[in-house]
Image: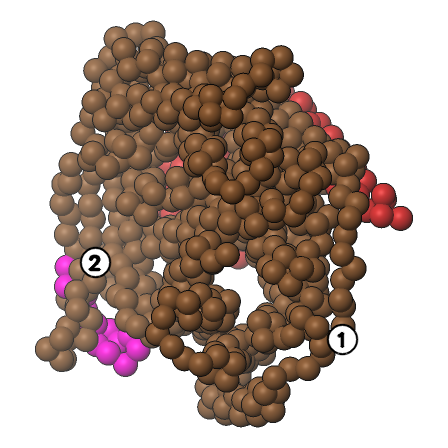
Chain colours: A red, B brown
Amino acid sequence: MSRIFILTPLIVLLIICIFSLTYLLSGKDPNKPPSALLNKDVPIFESSSLYNLKDVIKTKDIKNKKTLINFFASWCSPCKIEHPLFFEIRKKHPELYLLGFNHKDPTADAKKYLENDGNPYHFVGVDSDGLIALEFGVFGLPETYLINEDGKIIFKFMGPITKDILKNEIEPLL
Amino acid sequence: MSSLVGFLSLVFAIGINFYLFLSRYIFKFQKQKFNLFIRFSSLLTLLSFFSLMYAYVVSDFSNYNVFQNSHSNKPLIYKISGTWGNHEGSMLLWLSILSIFSFFFSFTKNIDESFQRLTLIIQSLLHILFGLFIVFTSNPFLVNSILINEGLGLNPILQDPGLAVHPPILYGGYVGYSIVFSIAIAGLFQNTDDEWLYVAKKWSLISWTFLTGGIALGSYWAYYELGWGGWWFWDPVENISLMPWIAGLALVHSLMMVRGEQAIKKWIVFLSILCFSLSVFGTFLVRSGILTSVHSFAADASRGIFILLIFFIVTGFGFLVFLLKEPKKSNALNLLFINKVSALVINNILMIIATLTILLGTIYPIIIEVLYNKRISVGGPYFNATVIPIMIPGFLLMSIAPILSWQTNKIQNSKKYVLGFIILSILVLIQSYFLDFNTWGFVGLLLGFWIILASIIAIFSSYKVKFTIKFVKIINPHIAHIGVGIAIIGITCSSVFQNELDFNLSEGDKFIVNGKTVLFEEIETTNQINFQALRGKFLFNIEKNQSKQIEAGKNYYPVSKMITSEAGILHQWNKDIYFILGDQKDNEWFVKVLINPFVSFIWLGVIIMMYSGLIAVSRR
């Protein structure tokens, strides 16, 4: 009986080491969590436009076209950094639909921000209570999602996108 | 030049340890010579460490490590602390502290010569493992390939006096357990008398005291530097330090039983191995970057695998020896319903369960991510809901444990304790009736005060009060427990009864905090040597003459382009008033004020515990 007790630490040690080693060898990056939504259907959402409350966008409106969804806010300084890149994307890939979700932001602030820095999005949806972000599993702003024609999420990125990420990870999917 | 000296002495020290290790089998040494070699290798390791420090102090940017982590206009203290403010340097610090422990252990008198030698050989083995790790994956003496006369700077969040001394003290605890580990393994191999238990007790107390100080400094730093108003966040790196701390506490208490000749040798050996294993495991988790936390260090898979290997070898070796050479002779335990032995056994079990609970919460995200490719995080709610309830019966038991008898069920003066407990319960109940009632607040306050009261009753009713050193040593366990009681009161009050106030203010505004008027004087920006400071100046209690100024703000570090928050704290004996300056919006500043009651009690309690640890070291 006592042998089993004494063996337990060795067994626990082995389990811990196996899991840790698997983790290390799998090349996971702690800063890039796997998304539960990757390769899943885009969550169902409904949002009205920042500029016209009657103008509403729904999940089915983005069917049959590639869509880049970006969560941003006027109070989010990293968003400001990636902002110019969306103009570049729009210019280079006119077929791509750019959908921005304005996250937990007063309408006036959001409008002012897009006035000053320009509006690269085809549609700016309001997510004032953060419910849409919750559906998408947004950790923190900014976050960017690429949706394919079948309405599946094929790419997700946390934090401001950069030229490298655009070139190496987003554009190959377009 | 200093890099070359440092690297050579590091390699040479590893070589000597290798030689010493082989000496067990090939070259035979006399005791005197053996000890001299051990000391010589320790001095070489220290020489290596101080060479790196010298490179930092003179800003020798030809050293790649200095170039990466230092800047010439940093104040001297941060140049020195920059030595261990990075992965490579901190591993060298780890090795140096290991050497220091071996160095002092080689002077231990009154122990069996071959036992001492075996312990030191195991230390040498550890020195070799960690030394090779430094040389092959984390060499701090690499030469910069380009000529450059300015460095990249130290992470500004680390530029703080508290944090400058936090790593060496914390490592004193982690690495101190190495000697306890070596002693226990040597004890298993030799299996002679129980003399080694006394030696182990002294060293485990030293390590535990260092660890306590290191953890407390870390959480004090988090309290005023991170600007979140709390001092414990169940961050993975905090959990990692808490595990060997609790296991070490169990070890220290188990070693107390040696006095009553009730030592459970098996259990003590197990705990000794566990403490050091947890320390190495912690080093692995932190250094491999496998866990995300406020302590984000550069992640590097090869380093991770190397330390994992060390962890596997050390722990596997320890437990394997334990399995094969299990101590045979064991006294039967005198377990009664309530005597000292049973109380200590129950407390030990509770502490181990608490340690395992924290371990599970800490590695659970890794297991889930490997199995299901999902990222989850285990945080405060899990630990609060599991660890605290496990600890509560232990705290209750601890209040009376020191006065329990070794041999019988009787408790001296039991009526006094019962009466004291009843009166105290009523008082706390009345107090919580008039303030906001909160279950955890009630339980915490009752426990804290009860531990203090029971210890005081014990001191006055069991011993004659004398002002001698001997008396101080006799009542030491009670003093330690009073420290715990004070810390529990501080922890309870500052977490349960914390009060938060939010304001949007312009310069010149007045607002009320805790019944006192506060004036938001002005915002001031100044240029310091290596950062720009933005400070909001507040005048607390302006009606009275004894108004106090508080400054809260942010620092901007141009070299690393980082902003750190600097909380402004007004310390009073019974509460801290904690100011955080937020963002500016249309000429208005967001100001958060936290009222943290009795935070100072936590630090006071910790200081008392450390004092007791030191007194206990000197007690035989």
Q: Nearer the viewer, mark 2 or mark 1?
A: 1
Quarter location, residue B100: top left
Q: Is residue B496 within the magenta segment?
A: no
- Which residue does the image show at 62% across and 87% down from the upper left? B414
- Quarter of the image for the C terminus of chain A: give it: top right
Amino acid under disc 2: Glu
Q: Are marks 2 and 1 on the same chain?
A: yes
Q: Is residue B517 within the magenta segment?
A: yes
| Main secondary structure type of the part rendered in magenta | strand
Task: Report x, y in % for residue B367.
Answer: 71, 39
Crowding at dot 2, Cα within 10 Å, few <14 / some 14-19 / many 20+, comes out as many
- Checking the image for residue B337, the label placed there is 1
As rendered, which of A134 and A86 lies closer to the eye? A134
Does label 2 or label 1 sit earlier along the sequence? 1
Magenta region: which residues? B509-522
Crowding at dot 1, Cα within 10 Å, few <14 / some 14-19 / many 20+, comes out as few
Query: Where is mark 2, residue-wise?
Result: B551
Q: Is residue B369 above or below residue B129?
A: below
Quarter location, residue B499: bottom left
Task: Report x, y in % for residue A143.
Answer: 52, 38
Task: Report x, y in % for residue B593.
Answer: 33, 66
Quarter location, residue A139: top right
In-image side of B314 versus B126 (left or right): right
In-image side of B558 versus A5 (left or right): left
Amino acid under disc 1: Phe
The span from disc 2 to disc 1 (Cα, nearest Å) is 56 Å
